[in-house]
Image: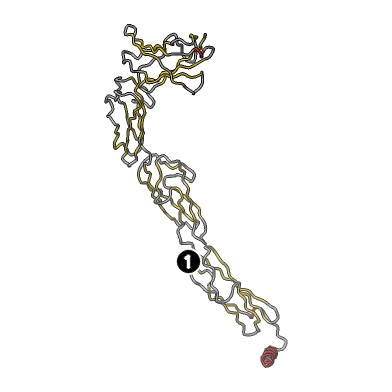
């Protein structure tokens, strides 16, 4: 280490001794040469260019030669635009001189389009509520975007038409500040995922028909603006006579198919029952409670639109008014063809005097009918 120090000291002494007596360091005697990048040079983005420079003098001792970035380092060709680099030379008296070089990086890369809605290759339901969502961007280091234009004129936020089925292409053109033009497309498909609509007019759900009543099936199917109907099948074709031959609950099912493979089902439950229109006097419209004498038979008179036989009553019961707690009852049924009246003479108890009771007849069609009475002594 002592030897190196002596050599350095000797070098300085020699330089001073060699300098002309009375001469001063003139910055104009220093020369800076920038070999790369040369002033006014042009490079494409991403080019590999190193900073090369030197400081020279035949008359003064240069103690430093500093660039705005290190010698041999790669210059910035990532960001498009104009760039300036400089080199400063300093002599042993502190005098400086600076040289600059300017170069340009051209943006030759077209901008791109980012599609979100519609996305390329996406599938959307017919009738879905969608809005265009896209933007244009320059590649990193580019000058930026000056225009982002859809071929169909629809800006971001505008509604996307999903009413028509099929495959569609959405084109967008992007222009950057270097006037590079990019063009990209998103291809998307609108599909029918909505089942067809079934209209079942007859038998209507919950409808009640009398046994043997002439009822025609009435049904139709539609697919709106969808792919179109491929089938509409009921248990019986529209216009056929409905089965009303047996009492009780019945179901009728319709199945519809469209050309996209969507399927819809509809089931209607209907009932076949006696043509019961209510009790005649001495009963009154429920919940009115006329008075009858306790312990005597109470005539429950009704019509079933013709003689349906003497076995139409399946069960009889009574309960305190408003109570669900029923007790079995008994009685006898007669039929008068002159006035088409059936009469069920139901027994009552003397103990019912002073009470209100509901008398319930259940017919063989499964329906129950209630009459309310106030019982007196």
| Residue hosting label 1 | 44
The one nearer the camera, 191 or 243, is: 243
Which of the image's four quarters has the N terminus? bottom right
Q: Quadrant of residue 208?
A: top left
Residue 246 x/y as whole percent: 30, 24
Question: Which residue shows up at 67% across the image and 76% down it?
Answer: 96
Q: Is residue 176 above or below residue 36?
A: above
Left or right: 9 as drawn, with respect to 296: right
Question: Which residue shows up at 37% across the image and 40% down it?
Answer: 164
Colour treatment of the image: secondary structure
Residue 14 appears in the figure: no
Residue 178 appears in the figure: yes
Q: Is residue 42 above or below residue 234?
A: below
Residue 354 x/y as whole percent: 54, 12
Q: Is residue 137 above or below residue 271?
A: below
Residue 160 x/y as whole percent: 44, 43
The one nearer the camera, 98 or 260, is: 260
Q: Is residue 123 above or below residue 295?
A: below
């Amino acid at each position: 280490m002592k030897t190196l120090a002596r050599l350095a000291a000797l070098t300085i002494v020699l330089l001073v001794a060699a300098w002309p007596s009375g001469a001063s360091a003139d910055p104009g005697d220093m020369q800076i040469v920038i070999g790369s990048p040369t002033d006014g040079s042009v490079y494409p983005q991403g080019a590999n260019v190193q900073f090369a420079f030197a400081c020279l003098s035949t008359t003064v001792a240069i103690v430093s030669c500093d660039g705005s970035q290190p010698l041999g380092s790669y210059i910035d060709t990532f960001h498009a635009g104009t760039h300036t680099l400089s080199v400063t030379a300093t002599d042993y008296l502190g005098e400086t001189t600076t040289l600059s070089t300017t170069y340009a990086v051209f943006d030759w890369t077209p901008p791109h389009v980012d599609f979100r809605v519609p996305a390329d290759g996406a599938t959307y339901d017919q009738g879905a509520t969608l809005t265009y969502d896209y933007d244009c961007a320059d590649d990193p280091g580019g000058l930026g975007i000056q225009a982002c234009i859809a071929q169909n004129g629809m800006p971001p936020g505008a509604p996307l038409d999903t009413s028509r089925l099929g495959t569609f292409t959405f084109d967008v053109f992007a222009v950057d500040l270097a006037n590079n033009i990019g063009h990209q497309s998103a291809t998307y498909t609108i599909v029918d995922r909505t089942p067809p609509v079934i209209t079942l007019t007859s038998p209507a759900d919950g409808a009640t028909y009398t046994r043997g009543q002439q009822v025609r099936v009435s049904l139709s199917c539609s697919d709106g603006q969808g792919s179109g109907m491929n089938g509409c099948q009921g248990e019986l074709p529209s216009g056929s006579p409905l089965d009303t031959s047996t009492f009780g609950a019945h179901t009728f099912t319709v199945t519809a198919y469209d050309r996209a493979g969507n399927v819809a089902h509809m089931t209607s439950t209907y009932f076949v029952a006696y043509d019961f229109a209510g009790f005649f006097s001495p009963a009154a419209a429920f919940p009115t409670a006329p008075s009858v004498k306790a312990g005597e038979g109470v005539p429950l008179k009704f019509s079933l639109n013709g003689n349906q036989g003497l076995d139409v009553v399946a069960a009889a019961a009574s309960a305190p008014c408003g109570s669900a707690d029923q007790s079995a009852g008994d009685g006898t049924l007669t039929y008068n063809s002159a006035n088409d009246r059936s009469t069920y003479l139901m027994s009552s108890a003397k103990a019912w005097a002073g009470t209100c009771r509901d008398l319930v007849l259940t017919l063989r069609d499964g329906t129950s009918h209630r009459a309310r009475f106030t019982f007196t002594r």
